[in-house]
Image (tube, grey):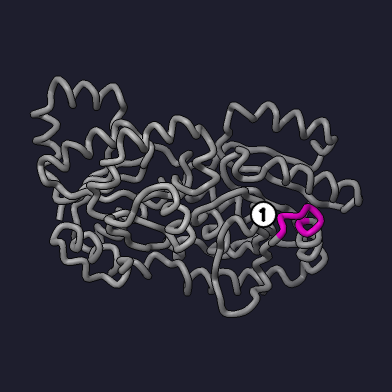
């Protein structure tokens, strides 16, 4: 099968970009031919209206197209051609229809969903990460006549090894925030958490922020750091572009924190657990794994600053147990979201979309 993957062009897009890369790896192992592309709006409009024949010939060379970006006029226009030439396509929502996400640029998104509702309606399959995403999406769009399949975000856990800096050589207990620096990720709440811990005079602790900057709020973020007088224990770095850069960051970090306002299925949480970092996350991360309490995962149910502080201090005071937590976290990652879990599932779903068979167990009945 020949597949065209259309999505984000940069690792700065975070989870969706990584998911598309992982899918490419899984499919190639199953002898699929996968091309990755993205279309600028200007390029698409020119081809759609003035060189349609060439665009149709290009799209017709594929058996299936997978869109990883919902709110894209370019993708919506391409989907219309795909429908006309009977080339099936699927859409991964990646949390774009979650309540929180829809509140951002609300009017633009409402207009898009009105004028391009056929983009969703004509898709051969809609990819939902979990039941939470399905429930929220169903309140926004009519999915009664759509085919939905559930597939969590998985990563290649084998690429992440537990590799920590020797305790003797460490100057700081390092708390890592790894993700886009924006409102959604709860970075301003995290600054309040840091301020409270600083007021308690916790010794030898550092907070490391690593990720793409949302330039519209970055100056506000830096100003708040200085206003709270916590700049001595806060370090900000650019995003990690490669796996090796990520692993080096994980190596120097002791725990990970994500007080997010909303997540569909955070890839960052899964990456740090794979690297053996204990995590402190908000309930909004929707990290639903059952089977008893995990000592290396702290889920803050009320999104309360005091609860976050207690969780950080809990790991800080039990530093001697971090190594055992790391082993447990890595083993947990292998069992629950290793890429091997979907190596047989994803190709079946693609075949279902092309053949109308819908035999995979991952389809919502």
> Residue 79 appears at what percent x and percent y?
22, 39
Query: Residue 183 at x, y = what percent?
Result: 62, 39
- Residue at left offset 57%, top offset 79%: 291
Q: Which residues are magenta?
A: 302-308
Q: Which residue is mark 1?
A: 257
- Left or right: 326 in relation to 202: left
Q: Give the residue displayed 57% in from the left and 45% down from the top.
A: 179
- Quadrant of the image containing the N terminus: bottom left
Q: Position of residue 233 (x, y in %)?
A: 79, 43
Residue shown at the point (19%, 63%) measured from the top left: 352
Reply yes or no: does residue 305 show up in magenta. Answer: yes
Question: Looking at the rendering, in which quadrant would you find the C terminus?
Answer: bottom left
Callout 1 environment at 10 Å: few (<14), some (14 to 19), or many (20+)? Answer: many
| Res. 47 image quadrant | top left
Q: Is residue 211 left or right of residue 88?
A: right
State the image coordinates of residue 119 (x, y, percent, origin top left): 27, 41
With 299 as the anchor, is 241 left or right in this view?
left
Residue at coordinates 36% horizontally, 41% vertically from top-left? 70
Location of residue 153 with respect to 47 vertically, above or below: below
**Residue 277 colored in magenta in the image:** no
Q: Quadrant of residue 284?
A: bottom right
Q: Nearer the viewer, residue 166 or 346?
A: 346
Q: Secondary structure at mark 1?
A: strand
Please state the total of marks drawn on the protein image: 1
**Could you say which is closer to the camera, residue 238 or residue 132?**
132
Residue 203 versus residue 233 in the image, above or below: below
Q: Quadrant of residue 283?
A: bottom right
């Amino acid at each position: 099968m020949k597949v065209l993957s259309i999505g984000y062009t940069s690792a700065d897009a975070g989870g969706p970009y990584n998911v598309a890369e992982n899918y490419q790896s899984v499919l190639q192992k199953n002898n699929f031919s996968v091309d990755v592309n993205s279309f600028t709006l200007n390029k698409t409009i020119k081809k759609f209206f003035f060189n349609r024949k060439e665009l149709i010939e290009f799209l017709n060379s594929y058996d299936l197209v997978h869109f990883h970006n919902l709110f894209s006029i370019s993708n919506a226009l391409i989907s219309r051609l795909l429908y006309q030439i009977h080339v099936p396509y699927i859409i991964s929502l990646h949390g774009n229809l979650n309540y929180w996400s829809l509140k951002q640029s609300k009017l633009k998104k409402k207009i898009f969903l009105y004028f391009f509702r056929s983009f969703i309606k004509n898709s051969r399959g809609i990819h939902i990460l979990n039941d939470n995403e399905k429930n929220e999406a169903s309140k926004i769009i009519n999915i009664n006549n759509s085919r939905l399949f559930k597939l969590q975000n998985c990563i290649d856990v084998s690429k992440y090894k537990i590799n920590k800096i020797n305790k003797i050589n460490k100057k700081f207990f390092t708390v890592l925030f790894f993700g886009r620096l924006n409102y959604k990720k709860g970075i301003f709440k995290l600054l309040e958490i840091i301020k409270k811990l600083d007021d308690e005079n916790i010794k030898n602790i550092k907070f490391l922020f690593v990720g793409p900057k949302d330039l519209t709020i970055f100056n506000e973020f830096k100003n708040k750091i200085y206003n709270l007088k916590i700049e001595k224990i806060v370090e900000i770095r650019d995003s990690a572009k490669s796996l090796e850069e990520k692993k080096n960051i994980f190596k120097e970090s002791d725990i990970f924190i994500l007080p997010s306002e909303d997540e569909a299925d955070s890839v960052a949480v899964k990456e740090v657990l794979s690297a053996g970092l204990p995590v402190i996350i908000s309930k909004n991360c929707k990290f639903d794994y059952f089977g008893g309490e995990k000592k290396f995962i702290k889920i803050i149910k009320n999104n309360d600053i005091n609860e976050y502080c207690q969780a950080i201090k809990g790991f800080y005071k039990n530093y001697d147990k971090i190594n055992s937590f790391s082993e447990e976290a890595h083993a947990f990652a292998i069992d629950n979201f290793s890429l091997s879990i979907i190596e047989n599932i994803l190709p079946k779903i693609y075949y279902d979309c092309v053949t109308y068979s819908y035999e995979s167990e991952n389809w919502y009945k």
